[in-house]
Image (cartoon, rainbow, N blue to C red):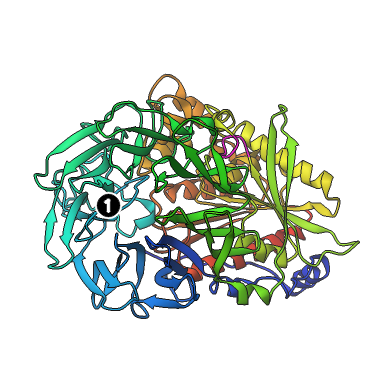
Amino acid sequence: MRRLTFRVVTNISTLAIVAATLTAQDSRGLATTDLAQLRGLGDVHISPNGAAVAYAVTRSDRPGWPYSEIWIRDVASGAATRLGKDGNGASNPLWSPDGKWIAFFGKVGDSSGVAVAKADGSDTRLLATTQGTNSVNPGTGARLVWSPDGKSLAYVGTTPGPEADANGDPMVITRYAYKPTASEGLTRFNDNRRLHIFIVDVATAKVKQLTKGDRNEHSIDWSPTGKEIVFASNPQPDPDRDFNYDIFAVNVESGAIRTIIGTRSVEYQPTWSPDGKQLAYLGTKRTLTSSETTMEDTHVWICDADGTHRKELGLAIDDRQGAPKWSPDGKALYSVVGAHGFNELYRIPLDGTKPVKVIAKGGVGSWSLDGSGRIAFAFTTPAEPGALHLLETNGANKTLVSLNTELLAAHTIATVDSITFKAKDGMSVQAFVTMPLGRTATSKHPLIVEIHGGPHGQQGPDFNGKSQVFAAHGYAVIMVNYRGSTGYGQKFADAIFKDQDGKEAEDVIAGVDAALKKWPWLDGSRMGIEGGSYGGQLTDWIITRTTRFKAAIPSAGISNLVSFNYMSYYHDYLAVEFGKYPTEGALMDTLWARSALRYANKVKTPVLFVHGENDNDVPIAEDEQFYIALKDVGVPTSMLRYPREGHGLRETQHTADLINRSIAWYDRWFIQKTVQ
């Protein structure tokens, strides 16, 4: 495969105009070279007695994908110990019930899999090698759990499926889901491996496979009695075609499986109550669901251990809820809720009293409780992307470590403001704006529109490295939580139903107009627009509706809803978004009418397309079509194709490269009066 490169055509006079016209980069702000030094927090797990916290640190300071380390921090002294050796990745730390051991997934020597180490990080041993899969398995939960007696570990591993190898000559394809997931899209076809539950004895390292077959079992939790492991699986005749997770339990001794919940809606991430009499899980109620995304918010549910007396415990919170965890006394559940750009932790009592917001106004990441109810959690704010906190039972909040204090102290971090405005039809919509650095009483600054994907996701004020680099360059960045976004209630999320590339695009434009009105120093003659995934789709669409933007950078966007539906690795997403499959009724015509490619002759905005070469979520053909169409109509356009990447960029050098090229693209076209 030939590697394509990107080149910005300029000359000496153009560079002079750029220097005179654009706001100079503020050297106090973040540069792309700083981003590789930022560290983030992965999984966080507090020891049963609360004396120490194990946490994963994600790093990007070497070529290739980010990698993970595990650290153990003593709460009283603050002393930290690294688990494992340099260069050996480790993730998913999990304390044993007695607090003497930590289990994790990682590399020990030349092998990778399930490993354990003592609480002080010593005596690391590999218990079982594991192999992953590139199959699509959305919404999976815990893949490693201790037995109640601490003598065994259950984990999710893989085995070969019944399909023939697709790498023959000719290749024989039989599966509906024959493409791999985008995040692991390093091979062309599904490896056909299946997820199954295994048990390994900690003392002897003897492995027992507990489940088998051609279904995937995952999202595990060991019952307090030690007799069963609960899990999620899709029992449908063709699980590739019909996405419908249900909840089951497998007997640890016999391997017998019983159904706990079997509905036409979806259940995710089950977990036992401390006494083993109940289960909590995430659930939906609609019968048409998608393996990729859904506009229905997941809520916390509970039921008895036999599946009876199901109750939607999270009904009182009209927002999307995350995986539940039980309070130590079993009287409440905790869940992270996405609301108005934040991810906040709620306590939801089982007795039906009002849910209580425990951690607010920030981005709660991974979190866990100790035996007394103290909570260790990862927390992101506009100024800090990686802080580890401990919330005491009396409400005191202690910062255990801030991973980026030294780096960020040497720079000026741009502030983030919010604005709420009325959309064209009167709906209330919120946006967040990162302010440019270097602003003076007379300066004017370009505005970049950054559109989130999903569409059922949200953006907020939490630290955003790319926006910070843009701010240092003198750009303001606006992020609009258009209708369809999560965090504003189910009615708001449903407002995009049957209306992709419709009113939500108008919301984005209305947000731009509101920002220009509120902040007169924004330069409406120098605006750029970009986004990834659904944000790329909206970028494609908006430039067919208006010529207000001087440059556009859609990443992994859908330009043709019809071709996308049949080339992506999932084929049920648009069915959920429009209420039926494209082959039903006249929906195919509607999809074409809402495809940016249909209106390529309306585009005047110079476009820089960005795509991962191995993207099977939104195949690169979506950009290839639009790229050629814009060439045909004479629009200045280039295409960036990043090798080895799937849906979105993960390699450190690629992330920095794209930001640098984006700035160059915007700077080039912001000085042009007309498209040439």
Secondary-structure class at tag 1: loop
Report the front residue among 46 and 625: 46
Amino acid at the residue labelled 1: Phe
Can the viewer see residue 408 in this picture?
Answer: yes
How far across and how far down the image is residue 46, in percent?
A: 41, 61
Work out whether residue 312 or residue 582 is closer to the camera in this orientation and state it. 312
Q: Is residue 556 magenta?
A: no
| Residue found 16% across the figure and 53% down from its top | 160
> Where 431 falls versus 470 (above or below)?
above
Q: Which residues are magenta?
A: 482-488
On the image, which quarter does residue 484 sit in? top right
**Outermost residue, top side:** 585
Say if 130 sits above or below 509 in the image: below
Principal secondary structure, stretch drawn in magenta? loop
Q: Label 1 belongs to which residue?
A: 189
Give the image location of residue 132, x and y in percent: 26, 58
Counting every numbered tag in the picture gives: 1
Q: Is residue 216 left or right of residue 388?
A: left
Taking 604 as reference, is 45 left or right? left
At x 76% / y 65%, what residue is drawn?
Answer: 437
**Is residue 483 within the magenta segment?**
yes
Most extreme residue toward the bottom is 86
Image quadrant holding the C terminus, namely bottom right
On the question of residue 632 being in view, the answer is no
Q: Nearer the viewer, residue 520 or 303?
A: 303
> Compared with residue 554, is residue 299 higher up or lower down, i.e. above or below?
above
